[in-house]
């Protein structure tokens, strides 16, 4: 009996102690979460709206549809997926040959051009391949679709290829890079194609006539450009570099107008806000940063909680300016963009 009483007294003493320990853990979690919100600049503007999961390999690129209602993602799991932006539902999955490295929407939002071992156009509604382009002997690293929808471009090895969408025939091959081309981007007016290469240069090609490089951007700091994005007005080119910064170049002048510095690792991708006032960058330092282009100020930094923080492979700003999509490992995170 005495033993039972002692046990009961022990429980009475330990009970509040356990409760206190539980409360302490909960408070600590709240403090950590609060710190995450404060240090990430996350409030209503900057919160994660959704995480899109389904890929079994790293996501290489994510792109908004022209109407902003869907996203397309390419992955090293050899698939391209289409997502409903409102619900986060995976509505289409296309199996490609080889590692899917790049994807781009047609201007009408009905087709996707995909780069993998092959360069192909897929019809979204039917889920069938419409066109397979011939010519490259190496995998496609990056793809782009012209604004008028008539041509597509793909980078393979050190070359940039342009094909006529209707005929499937080669329209041009640009061949002045001395290293592999990692990224290409078609200008908003359709007249130029920008290409970044491992040779350390960025070239802007005349897409309408001879294909001559009308501008040659060659950083003097030894950096290599990983990703490219044209400003909405087509007058500037943002370059995500291995030197942890984003260079903004005047086009066609080829003058460096701004260097955005603040990442602690290589910058993989860059995207402009629809109004052209901000750029967002994704980095191997596990963050997405938003920058004011005119002042060079880093206005917001987005990152996941420390236990789920991952390198960012690609970023894409929604057409309405409300959301930034980021490819992080096998997921796509949708962040509410800062005003």
Image (cartoon, rainbow, N blue to C red):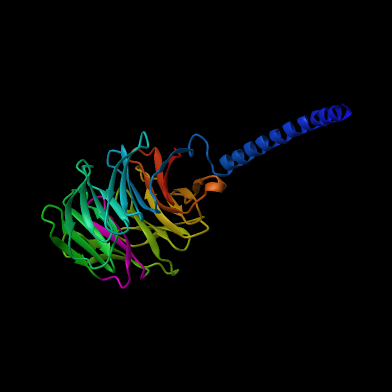
Membership of 186 in magenta stretch: yes
Farthest left residue? 167
Q: Is residue 191 shown to the viewer in this render?
A: no
Closer to the camera in the image, 105 or 39? 105
Farthest right residue? 2
Residue 140 image offset from top left, x and y in percent:
28, 61
Closer to the camera in the image, 250 or 53? 53
Residue 310 image offset from top left, x and y in percent:
49, 51
Image quarter for residue 14? top right
Query: Which stretch is magenta?
Result: 176-199
Quarter of the image with the C terminus is top left
**Residue at image x 58%, y 44%?**
39
Closer to the camera in the image, 74 or 220? 74
Image quarter for residue 24? top right
Q: Is residue 244 shown to the viewer in this render?
A: yes
Residue 71 image offset from top left, x and y in percent:
32, 43
Compared with residue 209, is residue 337 higher up or lower down, i.e. above or below? above
């Amino acid at each position: 009996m005495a033993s039972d009483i002692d046990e009961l007294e022990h429980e009475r003493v330990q009970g509040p102690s356990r409760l206190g320990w539980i409360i302490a853990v909960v408070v600590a979690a709240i403090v950590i979460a609060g710190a995450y919100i404060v240090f990430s600049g996350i409030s209503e503007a900057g919160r994660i709206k959704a995480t899109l999961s389904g890929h079994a390999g790293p996501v290489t690129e994510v792109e908004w549809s022209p109407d902003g209602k869907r996203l397309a993602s390419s992955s090293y799991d050899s698939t391209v997926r289409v997502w409903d932006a409102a619900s986060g539902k995976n509505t289409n999955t296309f199996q490609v040959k080889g590692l899917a490295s790049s994807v781009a929407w047609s201007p009408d939002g009905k087709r996707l051009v995909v780069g993998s071992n092959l360069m192909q156009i897929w019809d979204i509604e039917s889920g069938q391949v419409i066109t397979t382009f011939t010519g490259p002997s190496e995998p496609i690293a990056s793809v782009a679709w012209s604004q008028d929808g008539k041509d597509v471009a793909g980078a393979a090895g050190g070359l940039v290829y342009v094909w006529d969408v209707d005929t499937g025939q080669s329209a041009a091959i640009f061949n002045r890079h001395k290293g592999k081309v990692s990224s290409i981007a078609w200008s908003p007016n359709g007249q130029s194609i920008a290409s970044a290469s491992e040779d350390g240069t960025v070239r802007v090609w005349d897409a309408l006539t001879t294909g001559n490089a009308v501008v040659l951007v060659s950083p003097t700091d030894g950096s290599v450009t990983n990703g490219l994005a044209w400003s909405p007005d087509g007058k500037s080119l943002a370059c995500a570099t291995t030197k942890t910064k984003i260079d903004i170049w005047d086009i066609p002048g080829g003058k460096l107008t701004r260097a955005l510095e603040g990442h602690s690792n290589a910058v993989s991708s860059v995207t402009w806000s629809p109004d052209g006032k901000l750029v967002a960058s994704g980095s191997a330092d596990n963050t997405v940063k938003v920058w004011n282009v005119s002042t060079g100020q880093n206005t917001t930094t987005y990152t996941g909680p420390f236990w789920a923080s991952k390198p960012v492979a690609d970023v894409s700003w929604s057409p309405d300016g409300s959301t930034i999509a980021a490819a992080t490992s096998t997921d796509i995170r949708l962040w509410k963009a800062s005003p």
